[in-house]
Amino acid sequence: MATTTLEPRAGTYRRSWVLDWLTTVDHKKIGILYIANSFLFFFAAGILALVIRTELAVPGMQFLDQATYNQAFTMHGTIMLFLFIIPALSGFGNYIVPLQLGAPDMAFPRINALSFWLLPLGGILIFSGYLFGGAAAEGWTGYSPLTSDQYSPGVGTDLWIIGLTLVGMASILGAVNFIATIFKMRAPGMTLFRMPIFVWTVLVTAVLILLATPVLAAGLIALFIDRNYGGSFFDPSVGGNPVLWQHIFWFFGHPEVYIVILPAMGVVSEILPVFSRKPLFGYRAFVFATIAIGLLSFSVWAHHMFTTGSVFLPFFSFMTALIAIPTGIKMFNWLATLWRGKLMLTTPMLFALGFLSMFLIGGISGVMLASPPVDFHVQDTYFVVAHLHYVFFGGSVFGVFAATYYWFPKMFGRKLNEPLGKIHFWIHFIGFNLAFFPMHQLGLDGMPRRISDYSPDAGWNLLNLVSTVGAFMIAVSIVPLLINVIATFINGEPAGDDPWEGNTLEWATTSPPPPHNFDRLPPIHSERPLFFLTHGHGHAAARPADLEENDEDDVERRGGAV
Ligand code: HEM
Ligand SMILES: [Cu+2]
């Protein structure tokens, strides 16, 4: 296009790229900011994990004292969940959802920027406890009365409360934005039942956030009032009730585990069909299973409170077991998608398959824990630590890595190196299982969680050492990832628009997409618009000319949902 008078002349008005990123309201840049910020926090929380594992490698106190150990696991858990995994998945949601819907941006771009910037602010506040006499040290669950001003007089706990409240606000604003975008910004033809599964999972997640996170925020504010203004919500000596905190926390905390797993399930549901060269088996069943998991997740919170003696065990146990049904449907559909597919073991596919197997193990220990007699036995032991890492790490984090390798070419126009990616995967996968599988046995043998030392005669020495070796393998596996990202930025293989032969709309635009996302959109007659574009009429090269001819009858004949 010829230069018009409206275009600034070179040199007169040129914003620096730093200012550009600081002030951006483009969902793609915000998505990248989210992801980059999440990985920084991941490294910080990962270093804390190594500190924890080093202390526990052998019996005896090596280099931490009890107080710093408590801070380490509290910060590790809090940062991993609230500043790594939730924001990382929101980041991919931010980048990908508008593209998959054929939309030019999120519904509220400025609110989008605000929800991002609240995150580093909240994270820094949470961490800054270390500078002011010690970070919060009550565990990521912040149980009363540990959080009372009597037991935790330092300002670290207040900073944790304020930081988490800001992070919660970020989440809530983000959820509103996703819901508005998904209901209001879809391209013509993109009906709800043609939306990619990833969008569905982001939608259900956003609803969960909207219902659950304000409850946590209210609880945190109540706790702040208790600590600083003589409130009595949770203090029994003045008529409060510490178990009330647990109800509030887990009414949020259980849906929260689905907030971090559903989008990862969505990622995997995008990747498996592409690299099996088959459609997702049972699209609608998948959508309804996602909604069912979302609904059920609000009826099971007290399975975290079996041993308090104040909840009705059969109800919460039964409801928890029920969740295995929609989850089982998903597992079945994923396997049926792979069945007789033309499997291509690319790095994103390896991480997606890793997700399936690791999440399955976490699901099985979850069903075990849903049974009160088992839970009475192993609660607050390393069995729970094993379970939660198989779900959060083997599930959600594997999903984040799968998404990273899958969508990196779209975001930066270059493909990550495959051999390096595979090295990353295998060291990661083996290290993960070495680190966390032995914890099941440690838990069954009675090793409590949240202890900084143990007796050399307890019989836990070998398994702890193995676990620490595994933790360091995980850390080592990050090295090829970092090399890969840097090398790809310098000299990566150009990706083209559609390097994986994807099915969904993000692959219909350039890599990276232009600021407004699409110059033209293909017709949308199914949940796989690109598949019908490329396969409906022969080959990809014919695309632009085919755009208008791809009529509904044609698609229906080929088995597409119209
Ligand atoms: C290098 C990888 C990791 C290692 C070696 C590791 C290790 C550990 C260990 C040993 C504990 C128990 C500490 C104790 O109870 O004394 C722990 C707790 C925890 N971890 Fe990890 N972890 C890793 C990654 C993750 C990830 C990716 C997540 C979540 C996304 C996560 C979430 C948690 C949570 C929520 C707790 C509970 C904290 C608490 O008790 O308050 N961890 N981790
Ligand atoms: Cu739960």
Image (spheres, rainbow, N blue to C red):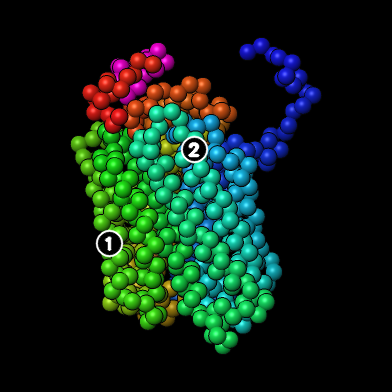
Location of the N terminus (image quadrant): top right
On the image, the x and y values in percent for residue 284 come to 29, 42
Q: Quadrant of residue 364?
A: bottom left
Q: Which residue is mark 2?
A: 184
Which residue sits at x=31%, y=75%?
Answer: 313
Q: Specify the amino acid type for callout 1.
A: Leu
Q: CA distance from mark 1 to mark 2?
A: 33 Å
Image quadrant of ligand 2 equals bottom left
Q: Is residue 543 magenta?
A: yes
- The percent coordinates of residue 558 (x first, y second) are 24, 25
Residue 92: in sight, yes or no?
A: no
Q: Which residue type does callout 2 highlight?
A: Lys
191 versus 123 height, above or below: above
- For image coordinates 28% across by 24% down, the residue present is 555
**Figure check: 509 above or below 32:** above
In this picture, which residue range is highlighted in magenta? 532-547
Which callout, 1 or 2, points to the residue nearer the camera?
2
Residue 171 at least partly seen = yes
Left or right: 525 as drawn, with respect to 115: left
Residue visible at 48% across and 48% down? 89
Mark before the other along the chain sequence, 1 or 2: 2
Compare residues 375 and 416 and report the one nearer the observer: 375
Please name the residue that numbered disc 1 is placed on. 322
Q: How many marks?
A: 2
Is the CB–ligand 1 distance for label 2 below 8 Å? no
